[in-house]
Image (cartoon, helix red, strand yellow):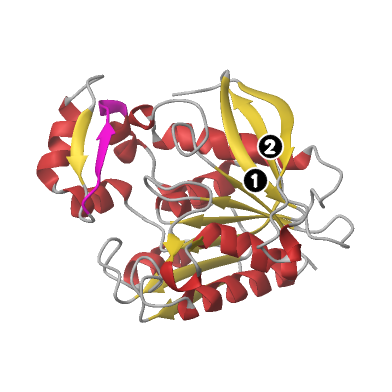
Amino acid sequence: MRKNVIATFTALALACIASIPSALAAEQNVTFQVDGKKVVGTLNIPDNVKTPPVALLLHGFTGSRDELAIPSADNEGIFRRTARMFADKGIASLRIDFFGSGDSEGSYADTTLQGQVADAMAALDFLAARTDIDAKKISLVGWSLGGTVSAVVAGRSKTPIASVSLWQPANNPANAMAFLMGTDAVSKGLATGDVPLDVKLPWGSTVSLKGPFFRSLTEIDPVAESVAYHGPLLVTAGTNDVIVFPQPESAQVFLDYHQGPGELWTRPMDHSFNSFQDHVTVDELIDKTADFIEKASK
C-alpha cells in the first residue's frame, strides 16, 4: 500500500483542440506524485467563470481518465464528454489516471484499492491548493470501481466534500469481481502473490493483476467507509446492469446507511449507460450529475 503523499504539482501542457467545443480551451494536463510515482490528470477550468466549483472524476476498473469511447459521439470518452458538459455549465473538473493506468506511472498489475484511494486523496490535495477553483466546493464523481473509491474517499477526506455522485458503484468489490472474472480467477488471484495473473474479461481483453489487488477487494468496505460522509449523495442504478447487480438494491445500500440528503437515480441501462447504443442516457446522466453538483455548491 502506498503512503506518504507528496503534494508537488506540475502543469505539463495546455491542450487546445479546435475540433472540441470552446469549453475545453482551458484544459491542461497536470501531474502530482504519490509515494514518488507520477499520477497524470486533465484539469478543465471553464471559460469566463471565476473560481468555479470542481468535480474530481474517478475512472473504473481497467479504465483511464477519458473513459470508455462512445461510438455515436465520435468516440468521445464518457469522462471527457462529462468534463466538457460540466464546463458548459460552469463546473470545473479534474479527471485522473490511477497509478498504472493511462499516462500515469507504474504497472496496472500493482494496482490496489488502497492505492487508488491514495491517488484520489492526493488529487483532492491538488485541488485544495489551487486558487482558480473554489476549494470549498469540491465534488466527487466515480464510476463503477471508481465509485467504490469515491465512497471511501468521501468518508476519509479531511478536505470538505460538497457532493458525491456514485455511478453504478460496487458496494462489495470482491463480489463484483467474482461476477466479472469468475470465482476461480479470484481464488487464483488471492494465491498468486507477486506473480501477475492474467485474467480474461467478458469483453475479450486480458488484464494482469497481482495478489495484493485481490486481497484489497476484501480489505475495504465502501459502504461502511462512506457513513462518515454526511453531505449530498447521488447514487445511480441501471436495471440492466449485469456487472454490479442486483439493481437497484446494490445502489440503494449506500443510501440506506447514509446519514444525510440522498437520491437514487434509476434507468433501464447497462453498466455503461447504454453508451454502445447511443449517447442519450449518458447525456441525461451527465446533466443530472451537473445539476446535483450545482445545487450542492450553492
Q: Is residue 152 above or below residue 80?
A: above
Which amino acid type is marked by label 1? Thr
Residue located at (66% from left, 68% from top): 85
Which amino acid type is marked by label 2? Val
Residue located at (63% from left, 34% from top): 122
CA neighbours of label 2 inside 10 A, class few (<14), some (14 to 19), many (20+)? many
Q: Is residue 155 above or below residue 278?
A: above
Q: Nearer the viewer, residue 50 or 249?
A: 50
Q: Residue 153: where, in percent of width, then height?
A: 55, 44
Q: CA distance from mark 1 to mark 2?
A: 6 Å
Q: Is residue 276 above or below residue 117?
A: below
Q: Residue 7: where, in percent of width, then height?
A: 70, 26
- Judged left or right of residue 35, residue 68 is left
**Image marks 1 and 2: residues in contact by CB distance under 8 Å:** yes
Q: Is residue 102 visible?
A: yes
Q: Which mark is residue 42?
A: 1
Quarter of the view holding residue 188: top left
What residue is shown with label 2? 30
Q: Is residue 91 visible?
A: no
Quarter of the view holding residue 248: bottom left
CA neighbours of label 1 inside 10 A, class few (<14), some (14 to 19), many (20+)? many
Q: Is residue 213 above or below residue 260?
A: above
Determine the secondary structure under disc 2. Answer: strand
What is the magenta range?
204-212
